[in-house]
Amino acid sequence: MTIAEVSKKYDLTPDTIRYYEKEGLIPRVPRNKSGIRDFNENSCRWIEFIKCMRNAGLSIEVLSKYVKLMSEGPETAKERKQLLEDQREILLKRQKDINETIDRINHKIEIYDDIVKGKREDYILEP
Amino acid sequence: MTIAEVSKKYDLTPDTIRYYEKEGLIPRVPRNKSGIRDFNENSCRWIEFIKCMRNAGLSIEVLSKYVKLMSEGPETAKERKQLLEDQREILLKRQKDINETIDRINHKIEIYDDIVKGKREDYILEP
DNA sequence: ATATCACTTGGAGTTAGCTTTAAGTCAAGA
DNA sequence: TCTTGACTTAAAGCTAACTCCAAGTGATAT
């Protein structure tokens, strides 16, 4: 698979994919005789995985660390597990923050419903 | 309340608070005769609100827009409601992404549990 | 009066994560 | 053979959101 095909498949620009590879997020991408990337199934699984993690906000740095540990073999399993646990903590916190904010926005939208329907006065400059 | 006190209260640096004010996220901060900020209850409520929204990832730009609409009075209520609905959509999507990632990380951690306990072989270079 | 200290400003600097650019290579079609 | 077009690289550029800095002001303590 060429970079253009992978780009379409995962909705990432070729530039972003090359950048991810350079930063160590996609290990061992095969090349053809002319040096052009020829992604195999394993590379694609990595891209899909990285995209999922990035969508949730994991940093390039952390993901690069994880890939590096993977490449160092079985003796880094414990460290990888710890890394994942740390990231999970961060995501749980983020989830909490987002839930709190959604609740708050929902509450405001309800008030605006009333205002728009004329059931309530607008209150200015109160958050 | 001085900026130092507000900074402590909301765990934001004075620089960040000044930056938020400059970007229009905190309207009408009072000053004393020497030009020094003297935050009142309303300013504090705004800061708390902005902090909550920023924690969930709403952009400075969007928040600045919202504050501007607030200051323009009741006729912008509908537009403010729409803005909040748009941001809610984004947050719901983000929530979904994070949930998916947490599930995936949980699954990996379980596998690592097995590996660390010697119940399973490590698999190298598979995401 | 002088020093201290928390504040003020405008503007420069920093970081993450891309994104663009310039210059080049290579295979395939006219 | 020449051109086209997709690829390659290193490096520069960009944006968001701070973060830091230099120079200055004003109230209070000695």
Image: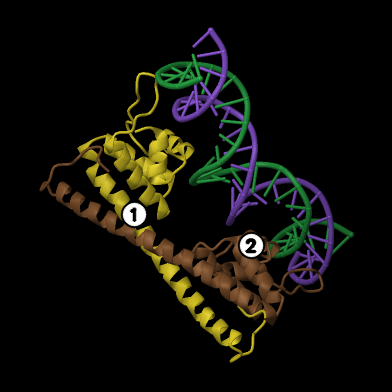
Chain colours: A yellow, B brown, C green, D purple
**Which quarter of the figure has residue B29?**
bottom right
Q: Residue furthest left?
A: B119
Relative vertical location of residue A26 with respect to residue A120 in this rendering, above or below: above
Circle 1 — which element? helix
Disc 2 and disc 1 in contact, CB within 8 angstroms: no
Residue B106 point in image, percent of width and height = 26, 57
Observer-nearest residue: A119 or A126? A119
Whole-percent x, y for residue A96 in the image: 40, 68
View extreme (bottom): residue: A119
Q: Which mark is residue B87?
A: none
Left or right side of B6 for B33? right
Residue under numbered circle 2: B14
The local crowd at label 1, few if under 14, some if 14 to 19, many if 20 or more residues have their Cα within 10 Å, is few
Amino acid type at mark 2: Pro
Determine if residue A23 is in view: no
In which quadrant is the C terminus of chain A drawn?
bottom right
Question: In the picture shown, does residue A121 fall above or below A62?
Answer: below
Instruction: Name which residue lies at 19% across and 40% down.
Output: B123
Q: Which residue is mark 1?
A: A86
Q: Position of residue C6 (x, y in %)?
A: 68, 64
Give the image location of residue A90, x and y in percent. Answer: 38, 58
The answer to whether dots 2 and 1 both sit on one chain is no
Q: Is residue A14 left or right of residue D14?
A: left
Give the quarter of the image for residue A64: top left
Q: Nearer the viewer, residue C9 or B65?
A: B65
Residue type at numbered disc 1? Asp
Q: Nearer the viewer, residue B67 or C8?
A: B67
